[in-house]
Image (spheres, grey):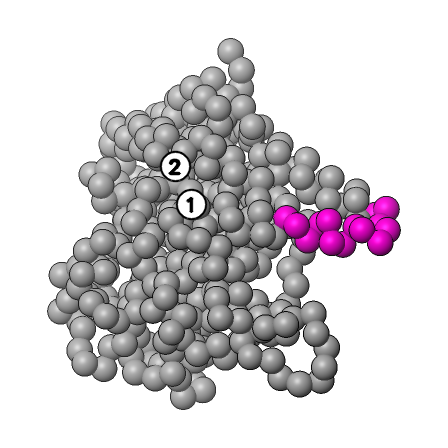
Amino acid sequence: MTEHAGGLPGYAEHFGEPEGYLDFARYGPPSRDVLDATAAALAASAEADHTTVNDLMRAEPRARAAAARLAGTDTEHVALLPNASTGIFHAAFGVPGGAVLVPSADFPANHYPWRRAAALGRAVPRWLDGAPTPDAVREALTDEVVAVSVSAVDFRTGYRADLAALREVVGDRLLVVDAMQAFGVAELPWQAADVVVAGGQKWLRASWATGFAALSDRALERLEPTLTGWTGVEDVAVFDDTEHPVAPDALRWSITNLSPVTAAAFAVALELVEGVGVAAIEGHVARRVDELIDVVRSAGGQVLSPVARAERAGIVSFAVPDVDPAQVAKALHEHGVTPSVRADSVRLSAHASTTAGAVERVRAALSSLR
C-alpha cells in the first residue's frame, strides 16, 4: 500500500505530502509535476541564449488556456496574476463610484482593496453581516450598490456561496468572486460571476506567485483599467514613447511581465486538475470531509462548518468544548496532523490526495484529549 492509498486515483500519486497534512486551505503542497516544471524552467534560464526567453514565455498562454477552460470561458477573458489580491485590487480600483456590498467577516484580501479604493474617492464598501446568502444580499441591496464582492468559499467555515442564486439577486450589478478557497476543488458556476480571481498556492497546488482572473464582458465594459501597466496595452512591443490604448481583452489587467517559471508551474498544476476533473476531486474531498465531521462529533467536538455537502467545500472548522484550541492542535501535532489553529477554533482541510489514514490520525488525536 502506497503512502497515498485511499487518495483519488490518477491524482494522489502526483503528490508526496505527509499523510496527516490537513491544511490545504492555507497552503497546498505542490505536485512532483510542478517541481519538475519549475526546475526545468529555471535550468533553461540558467543556460540562456537568443531563444530562451521567448521559449519560456510560451508557458503563459498555456496557463491562461488551462485556466480559461476550467473557468468555462476563453483566453480573451483571462489574465494571469501573481496572486488573488492583485485581482481584487484591479476590480476595486476599476469601479468608479457607488457602493460595493462586502461580507464584514470575509478574508481581509476582500476588504483592503475596497478600503483603499474608497480612500481615493472610488467605490465605497458597504459591510454585510453574516454569510452572503441570496436572501441576505437581497435585503442589503439599494440603488447605490453597483457591485457585490464575495468569497466563493468562506475561509473560516467552508460555507459555499450560491453563485447562481447571487447572480439572479444582484441582477445587472457586478459580481466579484474571490475563488481562492474553491477553484479546482469545487464545481461552481463561475460564469455567473463578472470577476473570478484565484491564487494557485492553495487548492490548485501550484505554489506561490501564481494566479489568474477571469472577466465577463460586463466587467470589461464597466471596470476602468486604472492599474493597467505597459504589458496591458495594444502593440506592447512597440516602444514609440507614446501612450498606447489599453488591451481590448482581459490582458488589460497586466501590469508587467510575470515570471515564466511560475507560469510553467501554474500550467502544469491546472492541467493536472483538468485531467482528473474537478468533479472527481470534489467527490473525494466531500467523502473525506464527511468522515472528519463524523470523527469530530464522535469526540464531542462542535462542528462550525456547514454539514450539508451542497453548502460546504473542503474545510472543517470545529471546537472542543472546554478545551483550548491550542491544546487540540498540540494533540493533532503529536499524531502527525497539520491543521490551522485559530483563537477559538481549529480548521482541517482535506484534498483529493488525503487518505483514510489522515482521518484515523485525527480520531486518535481527539481521543487522546479525553
Q: Residue at x 24, y 77 (%)?
A: 145
Q: Mark 2 highlights which residue?
A: 278
Q: Nearer the viewer, mark 1 or mark 2?
A: 1
- The three-letter amino acid code for the residue at tag 2 is Val
Measured along the vertical axis of the image, is residue 359 above or below residue 108? above
Measured along the vertical axis of the image, is residue 170 above or below residue 240? above
55 left or right of 243 in image: right
Asked if the stretch drawn in magenta spans residue 172, the answer is no
Quadrant location of residue 241?
A: bottom right
Looking at the picture, tell me which residue is in the foreground, 201 or 27.
201
Q: Residue furthest bottom?
A: 121
Circle 1 packing at 10 Å, graded few (<14), some (14-19), many (20+), is: many
Q: Mark 1 highlights which residue?
A: 70
Looking at the picture, tell me which residue is in the foreground, 240 or 252.
240
Residue 208 in percent (x, y) is at 59, 51
233 left or right of 151 in image: right
SS class of the residue under badge 1?
A: helix
Q: Residue at x 13, y 61 (%)?
A: 135
Tell me if residue 55 can be seen.
yes
- The three-letter amino acid code for the residue at tag 1 is Leu
Stretch in magenta = 46-59
SS class of the residue under badge 2?
A: helix
Measured along the vertical axis of the image, is residue 190 above or below residue 286? below
Question: Do the residues bearing badges 1 and 2 touch, measured as CB atoms within 8 Å?
Answer: yes
Q: Residue at x 13, y 69 (%)?
A: 139
Measured along the vertical axis of the image, is residue 79 above or below residue 368? below
Looking at the picture, tell me which residue is in the foreground, 338 or 190.
190
